[in-house]
Image: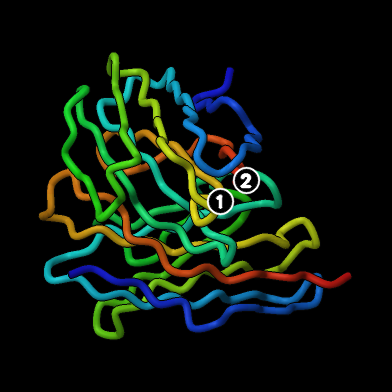
Amino acid sequence: AQSVAQPEDQVNVAEGNPLTVKCTYSVSGNPYLFWYVQYPNRGLQFLLKYITGDNLVKGSYGFEAEFNKSQTSFHLKKPSALVSDSALYFCAVRDRGSGNTPLVFGKGTRLSVIA
Amino acid sequence: DTAVSQTPKYLVTQMGNDKSIKCEQNLGHDTMYWYKQDSKKFLKIMFSYNNKELIINETVPNRFSPKSPDKAHLNLHINSLELGDSAVYFCASSHADTQYFGPGTRLTVL
């Protein structure tokens, strides 16, 4: 079975400071890993994904995430947070060998960037 | 152009009614999904279609019936609506690995 844990319900960071949103996962095989962002009253927007290759993945809006197989983690990072980054962030996983199985999402982490 | 669109955006209805939500994607994707997001923002897959065929049907009451008339459309019909059906419903489509979501339909059952 696949699962995703986002241990923090809320992350607060000052504008200009680096931010990290944590995600750990569990799959039986190798993972496909994703980050999505949801702004208020909007659908989910794709940020970035890890499929294979470099462990450090760069995505939209200056975000990046690092795949760490030994720690089964895929934390989302940004060197300098903006107030406009305030949103709900979802980590998701799919087992690479599972065909068309859907993504399993974490419960989301609300990021609040304070000016 | 909107890649994945849903109608309506808001739906307010009485318990016991039947309602439908429509979804269309113009990305040429083979696979489409319906997700439910509850009041705590938890996202859960409901259904998945690949080339008009149902491939995933999670534990969803049979009051919910998806229909895919063609590869670009996946509609969701709900019979005998209950208070607990109130949620935001998201349609998504995918090709290979990445899913693209619609803007959501907020369903409120009174």
Circle 2 — which element? strand
Horizontal side, residue A18 vs residue A21: left or right: right
Disc 1 packing (10 Å; few <14; some 14–19; many ≥20)? many
Horizontal side, residue A26 vs residue B85: left or right: left
Q: What chain is tagged by disc 1?
A: B
- Could you tell me the amino acid type at mark 1? Ser
Q: Earlier in the sequence, mark 2 or mark 1?
A: 1
Q: Quadrant of residue B41?
A: bottom right
> Which quarter of the rendering shows the N terminus of chain B?
top right
Q: What chain is tagged by disc 2?
A: B
Query: Which of these two is toward me, B48 or B84?
Result: B84
Query: Which of these two is toward me, B104 or A108?
Result: B104
Alpha carbon separation for disc pair 2 and 1:
5 Å
Residue under the image location 38 percent in, 54 percent down? A49
Q: Quadrant of residue A87?
A: bottom right
Circle 1 — which element? loop
Q: Quadrant of residue B59?
A: bottom left
Q: Which residue is mark 1?
A: B86
Residue under the image location 32 percent in, 77 percent down? A68
Q: Which residue is mark 2?
A: B108
Badges 2 and 1: C-beta atoms under 8 Å apart? yes
Residue under the image location 54 percent in, 53 percent down? B83
Horizontal side, residue A89 vs residue B35: left or right: right
